[in-house]
Amino acid sequence: MSSDSDAMPGRIFGYEKQKHTGRNSIEDFLENLKGIILGPVIWVRETIVKPNQKDYNYYHEQLRRVPTVDQCYDDDRLCKWEANQQLIRDKLIDSNILSILRQRYEDCRIYESPDGIRKCKPLSDIYQQAEENYSIKYGDLGVAVTAERCYAKQLNRMLWERRHGTVGTGMKKDSL
């Protein structure tokens, strides 16, 4: 039942005893009692828990990507619910990215105060592009965002751009 490390004279059930201080026998007794109480706990942790524990190299949970709403069947409510949850997570992540970019730009403007506009121009451009992309994807959807409405918006935008060019440039004239 005991391993080679438990056979060492300074260990009790895996608990490493302190070196003998030579003060009195009560300290030795308490150290042995502590080893008897903590030893099995340490043994279980080192031999059962740690070898079976997964080692993660990241600090947040990585969720798998689920099928989008256009890949779901019409009567598959669970697939549509998962697509909605994925869209909500994506929107939260995109809004946090936008918030971080805005904060970086504002910090740069404060730090570079008189020349902030000129020196922070690259951050401003990145923030403006990210804000435009966020507005393209989630704008005009309201608070109750669903994956179906977002997909319909993307389809309508794609059809508009195919027929009339980039949004914001106006409609093409019919050349007959």
Image: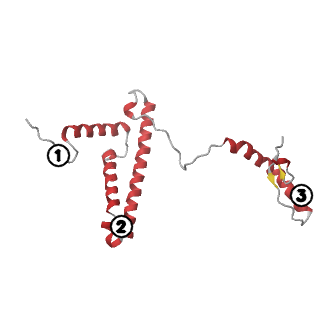
Q: Residue at 58% of width from left, 46% of height from top? A: 56
Residue picked out by circle 3? 29
Amino acid type of the residue tagged 3 in the rendering: Phe
Q: Residues within 10 Å of mark 1 (few under 14, many from 20)?
A: few
The earlier-in-sequence mark between 2 and 3 is 3
Quadrant of residue 162 within the rendered picture: top left
Image-based side of 134 in relation to 37, left or right? left
Numbered badge on residue 170: 1
Report the Cα–Cα distance between label 2 and label 1.
35 Å
**Residue 136 or residue 16, whichever sits in front:** 16
Residue sitting at the far right: 25
Q: Residue at 34% of width from left, 46% of height from top? A: 138
* Label 2 element class: helix
The earlier-in-sequence mark between 1 and 3 is 3
Q: Residue at 33% of width from left, 60% of height from top? A: 122
How far from the left and from the top, in percent, is residue 114? 32, 73
Residue picked out by circle 2? 109
Q: Are marks 2 and 3 in contact (CB under 8 Å)?
A: no
Up-down relation of residue 17 to residue 145 (above or below) = below
* Label 1 element class: loop
Numbered badge on residue 25: none
Report the Cα–Cα distance between label 2 and label 3.
66 Å
Amino acid type of the residue tagged 2 in the rendering: Arg
Up-down relation of residue 121 to residue 165 (above or below) = below
Residue sitting at the far bottom: 114
Q: Residue at 31% of width from left, 55% of height from top? A: 128
* Label 3 element class: helix
